[in-house]
Image (spheres, rainbow, N blue to C red):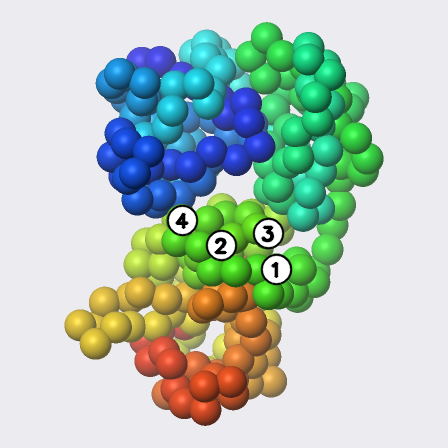
Amino acid sequence: MEYGICNLAVVPLRAEPSDRSEMVSQVLFGESFEILEWKDKWVQITTATDNYTGWIDRLQLSMLGHLAYKRLLQTPSPLTYRAITQAWKISDNSIIYLPAGSSLAFLEGTTSYIGNQKFEIIGEIGQTDTITNIAQSFLNVPYLWGGRTHFGIDCSGFTQAVYRLLGITLRRDASLQAEDGTLIDSVLKSKLGDLAFFESSEERITHVGIILGNGKIIHASGKVKVDFLDAQGIYSEELKRYTHKLKVIKRYC
């Protein structure tokens, strides 16, 4: 088995080995992965963070040895918490702009070592915050299928990103996230931070958001926004109608 690590700020993870293929997720700086297959300029990978499989360009990674990969699995890297953190790539004197949730792999002091490259992290590294503040930092971020950053995010990417910054790992898709956690049997028994899942007309889970309490939910639909939540589902004040039918509520912490 071969292993790699992302050496760029954010890399599209595609369904097929083509630049025209659907972006199903993103790989952030410092995230590691198993390499499954090489095909022309493409590499099929499975991410260590959330076990998600897709294709990336072979120029968008550094190779990683088995022992180094194992070390990252055993000792998770510190994360970046600000929407953007600057990293100075020493070899070519360039600046890389890291999104929140990037992994500062093999960090020594303020230097992260990715492959044979050194990245000096500029500014504050560690931070703690509340789930409300983290979630609201994404307000008005545009919806982007497969997105995981403050510059574009989808509904499950949003819940995953917020929980990641709280030190809790969620799986990538809403339907997968709904398989985990503790069932909460009504909106009235829910609390801040619970995830609410919503179903399509085919009764498949297709949407997720974070419950804020007081009849409010924050979620990514068109953009990250706050809407009303009740036993029926999400009510949009902007659209003057219910937009998502409630399926289930889960608690993770």
Q: Of callouts 2 and 1, which one flags the residue occurring earlier in the amino acid sequence?
A: 1
The secondary element bearing badge 2 is classed as strand
Distance of label 4 from label 3 (alpha carbons): 13 Å
Q: Residues within 10 Å of mark 2 (few under 14, many from 20)?
A: many
Residue annotated with mark 2: 153
Question: Do the residues bearing badges 4 and 1 touch, measured as CB atoms within 8 Å?
Answer: no
Distance of label 4 from label 1 (alpha carbons): 15 Å
Q: Residues within 10 Å of mark 3 (few under 14, many from 20)?
A: many
Can you say whether 135 is above or below 33 in the image? below
Question: Do the residues bearing badges 3 and 2 touch, measured as CB atoms within 8 Å?
Answer: yes
To which quarter of the image does residue 114 belong?
top right
Amino acid at dot 1:
Phe
Residue under the point 75% across and 27% down: 121
Q: Quadrant of the N terminus?
A: top left
In this view, the residue in front, 53 or 193, is: 53
Q: Of callouts 4 and 1, which one flags the residue occurring earlier in the amino acid sequence?
A: 1
Indicate left or right for 123 with 236 as reference: right
Q: Residues within 10 Å of mark 4 (few under 14, many from 20)?
A: many
Question: Do the residues bearing badges 4 and 2 touch, measured as CB atoms within 8 Å?
Answer: no
Residue annotated with mark 4: 146
Distance of label 2 from label 1 (alpha carbons): 9 Å
Amino acid at dot 2:
Ile
- Res. 150 mark: 3
Can you say whether 191 is above or below 87 in the image? below
Q: Position of residue 4 (x, y in %)?
A: 44, 19
The secondary element bearing badge 3 is classed as loop
Question: Do the residues bearing badges 2 and 1 touch, measured as CB atoms within 8 Å?
Answer: yes
Residue under the point 79% across and 30% down: 122
